Image: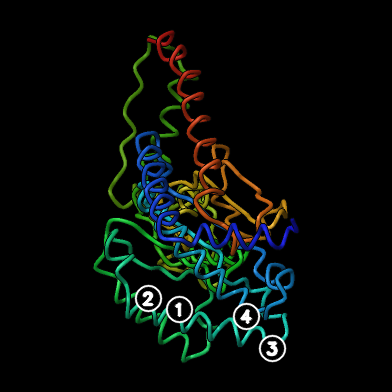
Amino acid sequence: MSDLYLSRIRNWFLSSPPAEWAISRLRETLIGSLSQGPIPGHVAFEMDGNRRYARSHKIETVEGHHLGFEALARVLEICYKCGVKVVTVYAFSLENFHRPKYEVDGLMQLAKVKLEQLIQHGELLDRYGASVRVLGRLDLIPPDVLEVVERAVAATSHNTTCVLNICFPYTSREEMTTAIRTTVEEYSTTPRPHSTPFSQSRITQKILSKQGDKTETLESIEESPSQSDDHDQDDAASTATTLHSDPSTQKSEGSEKVAIYPNAETITPETIDKHLYTAGCPPLDIFVRTSGVERLSDFMLWQCHQDTHIFFLKCFWPEFDLWHFLPVLVEWQHRQKQKQREEKPRRVKQA
């Protein structure tokens, strides 16, 4: 019996009503079982392999992308049913603008159509209380597509339970560049208060007290309010790194006021986090890329941290379903429980 004949029999059987009912019940049971264990708060999908899937099945490239959007709908329902709060997907890279124009135009129109369908039939997102956020260079999106993007975001803005981040068009390097640029602008325009906890007089008194006899009592160094302000201002200027290099803001003789900005030493990873597109989202727990390619390709580079579990799957994105996501989630849950077992003796020992 030929493989083609067996494939047709298999497809016929799986599409029959009894088989569809049984598979649906099995899916619900598996999802319910998974939701009883630890659930990731944030999952990212790099939806790769649409074009290769189209070539392997001898269909148009745009049709491959269309099937990819259908796979996204399946995955969203699985994630939200399991209890995942934030799903981030890589829909369009800035590098994709280098592809043939007809393909770029096709992707833009496909995104427009799917977003319009999302607006008209938003039962899935409303059912799970998911709001849509579009992350990336919105200024590069064609006006007709941008108008639909804004309507999709507005139509789901009332949902507050879950989030769907659509990176479109996006690269992680551009996101980090924007975050750093915004941070620099913020630190270059926000004056720091003139009063500082360590004035020059206090530092001088501390040094003298250490050099003098311990039994002697040093007289308190008096400082007038005007002197204190001047000393505080000098301290602030000497300890702060001024990000604004405009000579007009530098202190010079005869100038009455000087612009003093926040100390750059106070910039932390959390500062950058607040200026990223994903600000406010929980840490990334799972990163999934399909099509067998084992690299991040400029997606979620900052968000991937030491506890992010990265999975590279061989299936193409249009093929991705519960049966591919199930092993990923089970493996993640196993690692979480293993981590908890390892940390428990440490907590007991510290107590």
**Label 2: how many residues lie within 10 Å, few (<14), some (14-19) or many (20+)?**
some
Residue 21, position as x, y percentages in the image: 38, 54
Task: Identify which residue is drawn at 28% across, 56% down.
Answer: 161
Q: In the rendered image, which residue does mark 2 sit on?
A: 118
**Circle nearer the viewer, 2 or 3:** 2
Q: Position of residue 332 (x, y in %)?
A: 52, 36
Residue position marked by numbered label 1 in the rendering: 114
- Residue located beneath label 4 in the image: 62
- Helix, strand, or loop for circle 4? helix
Disc 3 is placed on an element classified as helix
Reading the chain from its start, which is encountered first: label 3 or label 4?
4
Measure the C-alpha gap from mark 4 to mark 2: 19 Å
The residue depicted at 30 percent of the width and 37 percent of the height is: 222
Badge nearest the viewer, 3 or 4: 4
Mark 2 and mark 3: Cα distance apart in space: 25 Å
Q: Amino acid at mark 1?
A: Lys
Q: Name the quarter where the C terminus is drawn.
A: top left
Residue occupying the far bottom of the picture: 144
Q: Which residue is mark 3?
A: 101
Q: Is residue 326 left or right of residue 154?
A: right
